Image: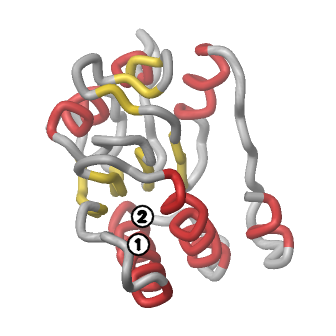
Amino acid sequence: MHEATAALGRLDAHLVIGDEDEQIAAAQADVDLVIFDGHGYLDEVRIGRLSVTKLRTTTKGVTAPGFVLGCCWGAAQPFMNALAACLDAPTALLGCDGIARFEYAEPLFVALLRQLANCAPERLSPEGMKKIMNMSLATVTAAHPHRDWARWQVMQLTPGD
């Protein structure tokens, strides 16, 4: 992550590997993009040990205009429903509807961060983030044409969808 953004010098990226409270705080931060990655569990709608529904606390939810669920099943309906219930503002979601193979993460996330770094410094809208996510998918599809990128989807979520 830092290698992809340092050369561009236009992103302030933070990698959070912490306990549940730190992960929730990171998801609720006033940022343009949140990327949650790890093992996704469809039956429990969680990433690692964190239930997606915990991204909403009693006082706050997610406001980032872009959200990536890099885990398996991140674009499946249960994950989308859980994330929508945690939103305080609309967001563009990038996720995989199926198994998200680990070797897809690096090229996709690097392309996404590079696209984001090339944007104007003002806060992005969910529509702008959706465009960036689609351009990033097009970039990795062209660079890695033998991989199955069709499961990766970009969609718009609004609070309570």
State yes or no: discs 1 and 2 in contact (Cβ < 8 Å). yes
Q: How is the image coloured?
A: secondary structure
Name the quadrant containing residue 44. Answer: top left
The amino acid on which the numbered mark 1 sits, given as a three-letter code, is Gly
* Residue drawn at the location 33% of the way across and 68% of the way down: 127
Distance between the Cα atoms at labels 1 and 2?
Answer: 5 Å
Mark 1 nearby-residue class (10 Å; few <14, some 14–19, many ≥20):
some
Q: Which residue is mark 2?
A: 125
* Residue drawn at the location 49% of the way across and 16% of the way down: 49
In this rendering, the answer to whether 21 lies above or below 125 is above
* Residue drawn at the location 77% of the way across and 57% of the way down: 12
Q: Which residue is mark 1?
A: 128
Provide the secondary structure element on which disc 2 rests. loop
In this rendering, the answer to whether 59 lies above or below 102 is above
Residue 20 placement, left or right of 86: right
In this rendering, the answer to whether 141 lies above or below 64 is below
Mark 2 nearby-residue class (10 Å; few <14, some 14–19, many ≥20):
some
Q: Nearer the viewer, residue 81 or 86?
A: 81
Q: Residue furthest bottom?
A: 142
Horizontal and vertical percent position of residue 76 = 20, 42
